[in-house]
Amino acid sequence: MTSRGDAALLERSLREIENLRNASPYDEAFRRWREETEGVLSRLFGAASPLLEHFRGILFTPLFLTCRCDDRLFSEAYENGLREARDLVRRCLERIC
């Protein structure tokens, strides 16, 4: 059964993604958001759920690092990760509402 509190936390997580656009995957705000979102998804869907595993698998940094990696590659990977997380959290909200 879904608690209203967890649904509200998931909605907050979705709203916070916009604020994270100016952060990086190394910022404390991002780390806290990711941990909180993971916790809510775990409570709502289970620790072994495909939705939680999908969230855990989202890449916010380039998959491979080379000496030719520049800031653009990092920012693109981060933006793509935030976009994927936003879409996943929206789907999760649709499932519980």
Image (spheres, rainbow, N blue to C red):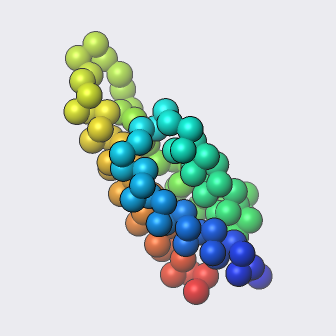
Q: Examine the image and state in which quarter residue 43 appears.
A: bottom right
Q: Residue furthest top?
A: 67
Quarter of the image where the N terminus is located:
bottom right
Q: In this orientation, which residue lies closer to the viewer: 13 or 69?
A: 13
Q: Is residue 12 left or right of residue 86?
A: right
Is residue 88 visible in the rendered image? The answer is no
Is residue 24 visible in the rendered image? The answer is yes
> Total marks drawn?
0
Instruction: Give the vertical position of 90 relative to 46 (above or below).
Output: below
Q: Is residue 62 left or right of residue 68?
A: right
Q: Examine the image and state in which quarter residue 70 appears.
A: top left
Q: Position of residue 59 (x, y in %)?
A: 43, 42
Q: Is residue 39 left or right of residue 84?
A: right
Q: Position of residue 33 (x, y in %)?
A: 57, 51
Name which residue lies at 42% across and 63% down. 86
Name which residue lies at 69% across and 56% down. 39
Q: Examine the image and state in which quarter residue 11 appears.
A: bottom right
Instruction: Give the vertical position of 51 relative to 77 (above or below).
Output: below
Q: Is residue 89 left or right of residue 71?
A: right
Instruction: Give the vertical position of 8 relative to 88 (above or below).
Output: below
Quarter of the image where the C terminus is located:
bottom right
Name which residue lies at 29% across and 38% down. 75
